[in-house]
């Protein structure tokens, strides 16, 4: 999936979808520190595509990938900004981008999914075999005329961590440019939902739904606890 700035005329998104993609969630506020951070990131830029690029660049430059986080992270943007510790996994980094965009009136949404094939970019950005723990969150933002523009700041930070890339590394320069407006399609999307309520479940709202969920006797299991909650996920390529 590739964004081409020379091509306009995409179909307009439904207004109710855009309204939903401008709202705050439990862990992603759009006022206060979030809005002030976004305003600093965009400066005097007025064009919405350029604003999205400025926020993407700010997120890439100011976050870091933390492999010690469980799952794909917590996605608690407010806590990240309050603490000044802008480290995490893909959900943390993507939701920070989403929150900053929404705070200045740009519709944006996280897209939660699963890596299902190897990557042509870096080995760490793909997966094969048992896909149990390779969930990944990307993001996209909406601009009139172009529609939804895909971005993946989390994988930029993951590649920096995994490949030990320096700021001036030519591979990083290319990757940063590529992952604004591009999704490598070795990944399948599940949903873009936040503050998820599971019907019939006794546990509270989930900030997002990307891992299997199970409850027994009114107690929700920790989906990342491999000692108590086991499952496998496999994918295979179908030709033709």
Image: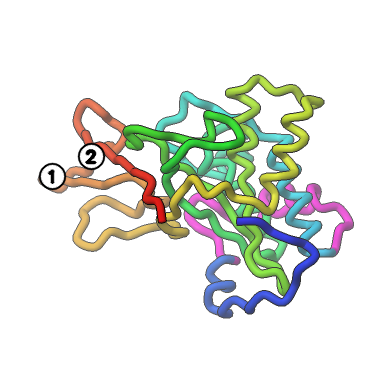
- State the image quarter where residue 163 is shown: top right
Image coords of residue 197 (percent x, y): 32, 60
Looking at the picture, tell me which residue is in the foreground, 121 or 228. 121
Question: Residue 175, image x and y in percent?
Answer: 70, 38
- State yes or no: discs 1 and 2 in contact (Cβ < 8 Å): yes
Look at the image and give the residue range highlighted in magenta.
22-46
Q: Secondary structure at mark 2?
A: loop
Q: Residues within 10 Å of mark 1 (few under 14, many from 20)?
A: few
Label 2 crowd bin: few (<14), some (14–19), many (20+), radius 10 Å: some
Residue at 73 percent across and 49 percent down: it is 55
Query: In the rendered image, which residue does mark 2 sit on?
Result: 221
| Location of residue 205 by image quarter | bottom left
Position of the C terminus, as image quadrant, is bottom left
Q: Position of residue 196 (x, y in %)?
A: 37, 58
Q: How is the image coloured?
A: rainbow
Residue beneath disc 1: 216
The residue at 65%/27% (across/down) is 160
Residue 137 located within the stretch drawn in magenta: no
Q: Residue furthest front?
A: 240
Alpha carbon distance from label 1 to label 2: 8 Å
Quarter in which the N terminus is drawn: bottom right
């Amino acid at each position: 999936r590739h964004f081409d700035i020379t091509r306009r005329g995409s179909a307009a998104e439904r207004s109710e979808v855009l309204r939903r993609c401008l709202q705050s969630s439990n862990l992603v506020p759009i006022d206060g520190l979030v809005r002030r951070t976004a305003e600093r990131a965009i400066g005097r830029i007025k064009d919405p595509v350029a604003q999205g690029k400025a926020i993407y660049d700010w997120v890439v430059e100011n976050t870091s990938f933390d492999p010690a986080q469980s799952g794909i992270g917590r996605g608690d943007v407010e806590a990240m900004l309050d603490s000044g510790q802008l480290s995490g996994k893909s959900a943390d980094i993507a939701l920070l981008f989403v929150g900053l965009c929404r705070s200045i009136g740009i519709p944006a949404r996280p897209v939660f999914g699963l890596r299902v094939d190897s990557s042509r970019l870096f080995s760490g950005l793909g997966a094969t075999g048992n896909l149990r723990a390779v969930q990944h969150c990307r993001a996209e933002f909406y601009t009139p005329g172009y529609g939804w523009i895909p971005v993946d700041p989390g994988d930029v930070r993951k590649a920096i961590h995994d490949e030990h890339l320096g700021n001036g590394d030519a591979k990083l320069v290319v990757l940063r440019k590529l992952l604004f407006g591009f999704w490598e399609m070795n990944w399948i999307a599940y949903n873009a939902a936040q503050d998820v309520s599971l019907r019939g479940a006794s546990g509270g709202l989930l900030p997002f739904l990307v891992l299997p969920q199970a409850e027994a006797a009114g107690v929700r299991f920790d989906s990342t606890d491999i000692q108590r909650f086991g499952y496998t996920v496999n994918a295979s390529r179908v030709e033709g």
